[in-house]
Amino acid sequence: MNCYLRGSMGLSLSVGLGLAQAQPRRKVLVIAGDGSLLMNLGALATVATAAPRNLLCIVMDNGHYQLTGGQVTATGGRTDLAALARGAGIVQAGTVADQETLRHAVAEALAADGPAVIVAKVDGEGSNARPGKDPVALKYLFMAAVGTVPAQMI
């Protein structure tokens, strides 16, 4: 049920919103990087307006555009993504800085009606690993997960 995006930096929250709207009985968890969310801040306003009850976005904020060479993002300076989410109208938005607080925040957000955004501050020394599958295979995995293609086609 993991649906990886490749070559679509900035679009994970938008894709997650579409999935949450198409599958309202399922909880949809989006995991995005700070750089990815910064590339499409308008998605926060769109999520707030649509107000899907089943959407949680966890932003892994290391203060860097990890996949493009490690350049410092605005969150490595003064920008607060949780504040931006709240400003867009997402009431359930906050920042965590350790694993235990993250576990608690995720459990709380999944138990409540969303949308919710949790910004997880993480170490800036990360990997730039990418999903090993090619984009076409990832597309079919996604389609199978949402029930639009038979699993045997994968």
Image (cartoon, rainbow, N blue to C red):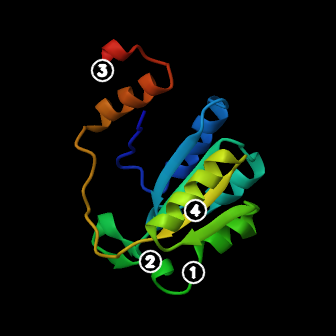
Query: Horizontally, is 91 left or right of 120 in the view?
Result: right
Task: Tell me whether circle 1 and circle 2 mark residues in contact (CB < 8 Å).
Answer: yes
State the residue position of label 4: 118
- Name the residue located 76 percent from the left edge and 62 percent from the top edge: 89
For marks 2 and 4 on the same chain, the one whose residue lies earlier in the sequence = 2
For marks 4 and 3 on the same chain, the one whose residue lies earlier in the sequence = 4
- Name the residue located 41 percent from the left edge and 72 percent from the top edge: 122
State the residue position of label 2: 73
Amino acid type of the residue that numbered disc 2 sits on in the rendered structure: Thr
Q: Is residue 83 above or below residue 133?
A: below
- Name the residue located 74 percent from the left edge and 70 percent from the top edge: 87
Q: Secondary structure at mark 3?
A: loop
- Image quarter of residue 17: top right
For marks 1 and 3 on the same chain, the one whose residue lies earlier in the sequence = 1
- Image quarter of residue 82: bottom right
Q: Is residue 84 above or below residue 149?
A: below
State the residue position of label 1: 79
